[in-house]
Image: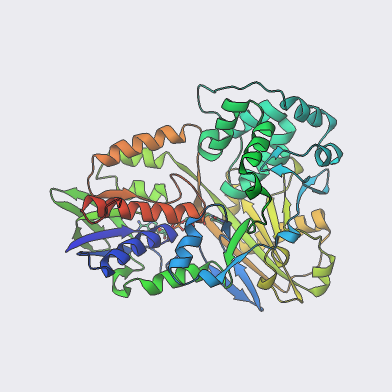
């Protein structure tokens, strides 16, 4: 019987465990033991229920176009529990010049593809609108080296586009800054489009044309989630795993290669395994691998993480009526607030709030405001309430408030990330029986983490001769 240790019980580690569990159930001679340092499984996927409302502490949904999370939900019996965002209300605002300005129709991520809505939008200055028109004639350009998202977007549309759109959109996804994040790692498509077409606008339109009828077919909404919240996915996964194989409150301290396998030390115990999957943030992977390979450990530590705070406020029906329609708003750095974004949850996922409740979920922190973690919950609530008053004149006392702090949870794919991943992979290959998964490598969202866990498990099973591509 082969034994696999899995370090980390977030969605990446659970996805790895599920892949091995499936193999085990089909009769393969393999078993696993999952070590999770905290008392609960699921990592940043946490759903609470407060006052009849569903409160997401971490992710609230995932991108529909990335199939791996929804596919896994199907396999674990949650296919009929998947829900889409309410895209009839899909309107997002940007805080500009002290007020909410709706993002113009036709923006694909940050690339304008429709002329009229952009020309008439009060969001951009005339200077930026002229840049958008000129962008149409950019010649193809193959960049010789990686660069930041800010550099690329500024080259095409100017600095205002970076401030009003690129930066707020990226801080919503990565808690990161456009001036740090790598184009090749976070917007690989943009680098390819620039090389082929020059103009990002023309490239987006060409891509849409290529999709033809599919582009006009009624699409499943942009975001997918679960009726009872993201925790539902964790609970269903855990129910399908071997309960004796899940060790919570068990931080792994080290994993050390032996002649014939690995020794994993957790607490006062050491145990022998044939293989190890490390499915933690890379800073934690770096720590447990320090003795195994210093070089690998150092490269893993170089992947930076940012921290974030989510604050959920519940209000009554009067507030619900007074809030703007739409999914919520993004706040550019130049607006001078500490909040990065807010979601009107009752619009985005209506069944998460009874009709007489409004839910406003706010994001703070990110790469440029790590100090928010030092603030008490009362201080954070005071900041959020003051800024909601300033931005949307929301002065009402909330019926409930919940604050969640996530320390070093969001990986920052900085310039050179892909080269670093290559170094990590070549070092890993020298350590047979080791696989890495998690949000530090090839995608930060829940679907990518599900995929990375499954791929890590598949790799290990293949090394053991228990997996064939067929
Ligand atoms: C506030 C927030 C909002 C987000 N919103 C979205 C969203 O809307 N959509 C989306 O797709 N993605 C979102 N993300 C990103 C996504 O949720 C995460 O990238 C993903 O869930 C990470 O999963 P993971 O298992 O790799 O890591 P984690 O969830 O961080 O889990 C890692 C686990 O490893 C454990 N661990 C660490 N060290 C050790 C050790 N030495 N021994 C044992 N266990 C250890 C930790 O306790 C933790 O449970 C969000 C993230 C955050 C923080």
Residue 361: x %, y % from top left = 67, 62
Residue at (61, 69) in percent of width and height: 55
Residue at (24, 64) in percent of width and height: 268
How many numbered marks, from 0 up? 0
| Nearest the eye: 258 or 275 | 275
Is residue 278 depicted above or below 124 in this figure? below
Relative side of 450 to 314, left or right: left
How are the residues colored? rainbow
Can residue 361 be spotted in the picture?
yes
Residue at (38, 42) in percent of width and height: 300
Relative side of 92 to 30, left or right: right
Residue 281: x %, y % from top left = 42, 51
Quadrant occupied by the N terminus: bottom left
Residue 425: x %, y % from top left = 33, 39
Residue 56: x %, y % from top left = 59, 66
Is residue 25 depicted above or below 143 in this figure? below
Is residue 17 depicted above or below 427 in this figure? below
């Amino acid at each position: 019987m082969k034994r696999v240790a899995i370090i980390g019980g977030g969605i990446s580690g659970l996805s790895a465990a599920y892949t091995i569990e499936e193999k085990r159930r089909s009769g393969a001679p393999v078993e696993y033991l999952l070590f999770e340092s905290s008392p609960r499984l699921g990592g940043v996927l946490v759903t609470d229920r407060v006052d009849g409302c569903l409160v997401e502490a971490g992710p609230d949904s995932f991108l529909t176009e990335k199939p791996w999370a929804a596919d896994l939900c199907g396999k674990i019996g949650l296919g009929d529990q998947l829900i889409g965002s309410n895209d009839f209300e899909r309107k997002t605002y940007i805080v500009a010049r002290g007020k909410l300005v709706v993002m113009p129709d036709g923006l694909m991520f940050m690339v304008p593809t429709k002329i009229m809505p952009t020309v008439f939008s009060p969001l951009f200055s005339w200077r930026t609108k002229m840049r958008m028109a000129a962008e149409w004639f950019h010649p193809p350009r193959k960049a010789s080296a990686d660069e930041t998202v800010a550099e690329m977007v500024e080259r095409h549309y100017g600095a205002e586009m970076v401030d009003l759109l690129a930066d707020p959109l990226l801080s919503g996804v990565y808690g990161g800054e456009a001036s740090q994040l790598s184009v090749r790692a976070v917007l690989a498509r943009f680098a390819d489009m620039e090389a082929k077409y020059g103009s990002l606008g023309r490239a987006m339109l060409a891509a849409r044309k290529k999709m033809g009828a599919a582009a006009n077919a009624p699409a499943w909404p942009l975001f997918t989630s679960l009726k009872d919240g993201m925790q539902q996915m964790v609970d269903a996964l855990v129910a399908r795993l071997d309960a004796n194989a899940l060790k919570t409150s068990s931080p792994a301290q080290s994993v050390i290669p032996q002649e014939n396998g690995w020794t994993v030390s957790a607490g006062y115990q050491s145990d022998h395994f044939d293989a190890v999957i490390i499915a933690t943030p890379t800073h934690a992977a770096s720590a447990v691998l320090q003795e195994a390979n210093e070089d690998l450990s150092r490269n893993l530590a170089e992947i930076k993480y940012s921290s974030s705070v989510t604050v959920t406020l519940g209000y009554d029906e009067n507030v619900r009526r007074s809030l703007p329609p739409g999914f919520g708003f993004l706040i550019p750095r130049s607006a001078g607030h500490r909040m990065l974004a807010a979601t009107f949850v009752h619009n985005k996922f209506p069944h998460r709030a009874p009709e007489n409740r409004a839910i406003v979920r706010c994001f703070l922190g990110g790469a440029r405001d790590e100090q928010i973690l030092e603030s008490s919950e009362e201080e954070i609530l005071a900041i959020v309430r003051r800024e909601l008053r300033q931005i949307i004149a929301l002065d009402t006392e909330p019926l409930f408030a919940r604050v969640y702090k996530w320390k070093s949870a969001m990986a920052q794919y900085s310039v050179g990330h892909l080269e670093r991943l290559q170094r990590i992979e070549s070092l890993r290959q020298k350590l047979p029986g080791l696989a890495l998964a998690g949000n530090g490598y090839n995608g930060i969202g829940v679907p990518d983490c599900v995929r990375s866990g499954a791929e890590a498990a598949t790799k290990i099973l293949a090394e053991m001769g228990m997996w064939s591509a067929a």
